[in-house]
Image (cartoon, rainbow, N blue to C red):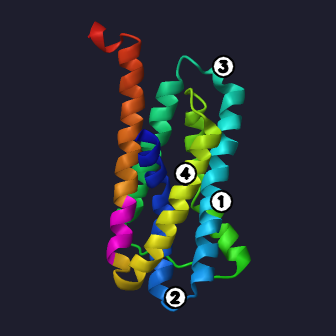
Amino acid sequence: MELLLLSIALAMDAAALSIANGAKYRNLALSKILFIAFIFGFFQAAMPLAGYFLGAAFARFIAQIDHFIAFAILGFLGVKMIHETCRNEPCEAVSLDTKMLLSGGFATSIDALAVGVTLSFTATDIWFSGAVIGIVCFALSVAAFYVGKFAGEFLEQKALILGGAILIALGFKILITHLLDHGFLSQI
């Protein structure tokens, strides 16, 4: 369940962009929608893998504070998502040429790289996690495109707030679970 929530939270940037694209390009062919969703899903799957292996290289050096780092990264990303929503700037649709789609896929998955680092601190099957994150992003991007055709800007903002709240909650869960497991909270 936690992986599914994390996947949904990570997909919110891509979903918001897909909503914007759906509002702008209402008559796009299904093949192009699937291609766009594939690009977003691919980057969402690949970036946690990269972050995981980067984090795993340093995990033994920071094992005593990894839960604080995970909490800080997830909390920062969540607050950032919510803050960007509060600026009331609508998400810009991406140009549909391949170069811009690749840029958009990369940009919407930077947070997944950071989350991959946090996953390296846990006993996570990163290959399975990466696949789930990518598939969820793909599915949500396709659905969000069609939602964008009808609801546009209104739902785009709500998606980013939900994603931010989920990331913050997961950060707190990691921190509290670690503190409980190591008896820190029982000492208070």
Amino acid type indicated by mark 2: Tyr
Q: Are marks 4 and 2 in contact (CB under 8 Å)?
A: no
Query: Depth-wise, is mark 3 or mark 1 nearer the camera?
Result: 1
Badge 2: residue crowd in 10 Å (few <14, some 14–19, many ≥20):
some
Residue under the image location 40 percent in, 27 percent down: 175
Q: Is residue 155 magenta?
A: yes
Q: Main secondary structure of the magenta part?
A: helix
In the picture of the structure, the residue carrying the numbered disc 4 is: 133
Image quarter in which the N terminus is found: top left
Q: Is residue 132 above or below residue 127?
A: below
Give how far across and how far down residue 38 sits, in percent: 63, 67
Asked if the residues shown at circle 4 and circle 3 are in contact, with their CB atoms under 8 angstroms apart, the answer is: no
Query: How far apart are labels 4 and 2 at the CA level?
Result: 26 Å
Q: Give the number of the mark in front: 4 or 3.
A: 4
- Are the two marked residues, 3 and 1, in contact with CB atoms closer than 8 angstroms? no
| Mark 2, residue position | 25
Q: Nearer the viewer, mark 2 or mark 3?
A: 2
From the viewer's perspective, tell me whether residue 147 is left or right of residue 96.
Answer: left
Mark nearer the N terminus (3 vs 1):
1
- Residue 54: give x, y in percent of width and height: 70, 36
Mark 4: which amino acid?
Answer: Ile
Dot 1 amino acid type: Phe
Judged by depth in the image, the label closer to the viewer, 4 or 2, is 4
The mark closer to the camera, 1 or 2, is 1
Asked which quadrant contains residue 150, the reply is bottom left
Q: Which residue is mark 3?
A: 61
Which badge, 1 or 2, comes first in the chain's sequence?
Answer: 2
Of callouts 1 and 4, the N-terminal one: 1
Q: Which residue is mark 1?
A: 42
Is residue 127 depicted above or below 62 in this figure?
A: below
Label 2 to label 3: alpha-carbon separation:
48 Å
